[in-house]
Amino acid sequence: MNALASAAERLVSAPPGGPAAPHDLRPPPGVALAARTPWFDATACAGHRTVRWQDGVREGEDPLTIGTHHDLASVTKVVGTTTALMRLVSDRIVDLDTEVNRYLPGFHGGGKESVTVRDLLLHRGGLWEWHPLYIAADGPEEAHRVAEELPLRYQPRAERHYSDLGFILLGRVITSVTGLGLQQAVSDLVTGPLGLDATRYARPAGEPVATGARDDRIEIAMLDSGLPYPVPHRSGDFAGWRRGPVHGQVADGNAYHAFGGVSGHAGLFSTVPDLLRFATALAGYREHDTLVRPEVAREFFAAGPDEAQALGFRRYRLELGGETLTVLGHPGHVGCAVGFVPDRGVALALASNRLLVEGTPVPGEALWHELLKATATEIEERT
């Protein structure tokens, strides 16, 4: 059994982290891991893609497969939005240092005029991290207007504050400059050229499908507790909550309730093979220079003011013998992640349904770091 297979079996049996990890964490029902490197190409999966509950009792499940379709959640930020912007910057249609309100005139006032596309990609635009747009708006256009008109929470460029709202605005920048809906723009710019046939917005492209969440309980709790973000609403202000399993729908509340499953911050469904294909293409970006100019790709991959944040992509360390490699990628709240090492032929993909548990789910970042460790172990054993 290779290191990835061992990791997959271990992850569905117990939460990662060892004895110091919180004791109330619940491991994901299912997990799929994939790594493509110059030394090996491996996939592994364990557990179940769906879990059925009745009155708090687990009464059935279906097995997870490598070809299962998953809600990517925030992985959409890099597979869709960031990569589409890479192409638009490469084609000189978008300028990273142009102010956002040049593309979105409704984004103005209170210091917004200085916020650039680059700031939003670096999560340093000063925006609120999150806001329940589906409560304040009726339909996608109204929700986009509310997102543009919300006042800033922080001083632009002062510090990094990870923001869904920033990527909602970046999705609008894409539609503004292309004249296309976001779904069509991402298809034309990214998923079509890269052959990502199983990657689409709003709903899975086929079967089987992993259930993404038990219901809308996470956002209900966020509103009623005011944590982690204080917002001027409570769950009783919204009548559209999903009270049953979220299956074949986007789990993210804004993406689903406000935008019909199509947004710059979330909304894509995909499979592990498609994620691996995407990561392989970006790892070998020099071979795709007809899509993205290499110098533009390198600018997107470089660390910004925050070492762990590039333009859209997060940056992770992969310890490999005496060498430290930088993995570019992004996780998603439902339990997926994608990553790659530019110029080194390393592509990684993770898929899980970590929210489908009774209790506190293991953090997605913990699952991702287990894949990084398993990949390093397998490379070292083979070399």
Image (cartoon, grey):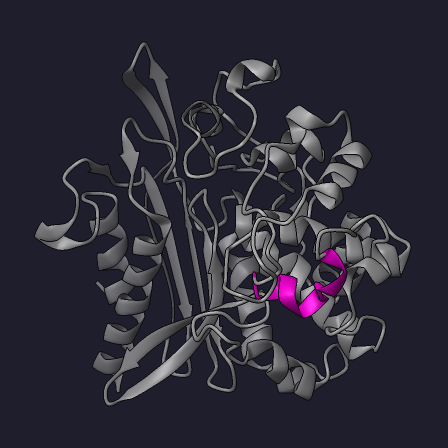
> Residue 352 appears at what percent x and percent y?
40, 45
Could you say where residue 245 lies in the image, as x and y percent from the top left?
47, 23
Residue 217 is left or right of residue 185, and the answer is: left
- Horizontal side, residue 334 vs residue 163: left or right: left
Q: Is residue 72 visible?
A: no
- Foreground pick, 180 / 287: 180
Left or right of residue 183: residue 80 = left
Query: Residue at left 54%, top 78%?
Result: 283
Where is residue 21 shown, x and y percent of the image? 16, 49
Which is more toward the observer, 148 or 67?
Answer: 148
**Picture layout, residue 18 above or below residue 321:** above
Q: Residue at x 63, y 47 (%)?
A: 165
- Residue toward you, 218 or 163: 163
Which one is nearer the viewer's eye here, 36 or 306?
306
Instruction: Answer whether residue 17 is magenta in the image.
Output: no
| Picture quadrant where residue 298 is located | bottom right
Task: Find out whether residue 122 is within the magenta segment.
Answer: yes
Q: Quadrant of the N terminus?
A: bottom left
What's drawn in magenta, residue-wise?
112-123
- Expressed as whole percent of the image width and height from the top left, the position of residue 199 reads 64, 51
Tell me the quarter of the picture where residue 53 sits.
top left
Q: What residue is at 31 percent from the left and 71 percent from the top? A: 375
